[in-house]
Amino acid sequence: MRKLIPWVLALSAGACVGAPIQETPTPIARGPWLQAVTSTSIIVCFRTKDPIKGCIEFGPTEELGQRAEGPEGTKHEIRLEGLKPQTRYSYTAHGMAGTFVTAPDPTGAGGLVAAR
């Protein structure tokens, strides 16, 4: 039973699909927070206690379906690109979930930008 506990903890820490499961979970120490919102991209930032490869799963539904990765480290800034203007997206960053809305198309009508 003792050998199973690290694997269960790693799964609950939100390891990326397709990424190797870490034997020792490394939870997010700070964040996530969002910055540089445009009509087609956003940057998701977070900090971890120990160096890990940053990974964000995201999509326009709760099923997500897309993934972006960053280099290994403790300070993560992962750019999500190819997004649709003024669209709500869900995301997870190593088990921490949130939503955001992209900015309106700069050539179209105005609208509100919201993040949570």
Image (cartoon, helix red, strand yellow):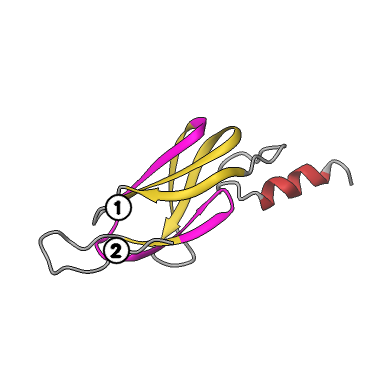
Q: List the single residue furthest toward the left.
A: 107
| Nearer-the-camera pick, 5 or 43 | 43
Marks 1 and 2 close (CB-CB < 8 Å) = yes
Give residue 100's position: percent from left, percent from top: 39, 61
Q: Secondary structure at mark 1?
A: loop
Quadrant in the rendering for residue 28: top right
Q: Amino acid at mark 1?
A: Val
As for residue 109 lying within the magenta part, the answer is: no
- Name the image quarter holding the C terminus: bottom left
Q: Which residue is mark 1?
A: 37
Task: Write the residue at 60% across / 46% down.
Answer: 15
Magenta residues (range): 72-98
Q: Is residue 36 above or below residue 59?
A: above
Q: Is residue 35 above or below residue 87?
A: above
Give residue 71's position: percent from left, percent from top: 46, 31
| Nearer-the-camera pick, 38 or 14 | 38
Sequence-first tag of 1 and 2: 1
As for residue 95 lying within the magenta part, the answer is: yes
Q: List the single residue furthest toward the right.
A: 1
- Overall secondary structure of the magenta section: strand
Give residue 6's position: percent from left, percent from top: 77, 42
Q: Which residue is mark 2?
A: 113
Q: Amino acid at mark 2?
A: Val
